[in-house]
Amino acid sequence: MYPNPATSVINVEFSTVQNDNTVIKLMDVSGRAMMQNEITALNGFNKSVFDVSKLSKGVYMVVIENSKGVAKNRIVIN
């Protein structure tokens, strides 16, 4: 996930070992989904881009969910 901190966009990159429906959410500190992308992730490298230029400054969580589990990472928006 980069850049961190971010001002305009964040790039979320991840890899999977099989094709899988994947939900990528940008959550605020209270747990509300501020943005969400639903993609069919392909075996290997995947990327999703979020325009965060209109979000308030602060700390957010990027949550990646698929049938294999959940991954969470913190990101700062300036």
Image: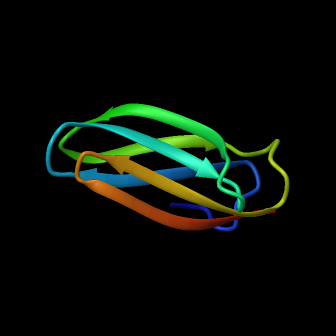
Residue at 47% over, 44% down: 24
Rendering coords of residue 64 (x, y %) = 42, 51
Q: Nearer the viewer, residue 51 or 34?
A: 34
Query: Hey, which quadrant is residue 69 in on the image?
Result: bottom left
Rendering coords of residue 28 (x, y %) = 70, 55
**By what rule are the colours in the image chosen?**
rainbow
Please state, as top left, top right, bottom left or bottom right, where the C terminus lies in the image. bottom right
Rendering coords of residue 40 (x, y %) = 31, 31
Q: Is residue 49 left or right of residue 41?
A: right
Indicate whether 4 appears above or below 49. below
Q: Is residue 35 left or right of residue 40?
A: right
Indicate whether 20 appears above or below 3. above
Rendering coords of residue 14 (x, y %) = 35, 54
Residue farthest to the left? 18
Residue at 69% over, 67% down: 5
Residue at 25% over, 45% down: 67
Residue at 38% over, 49% down: 65
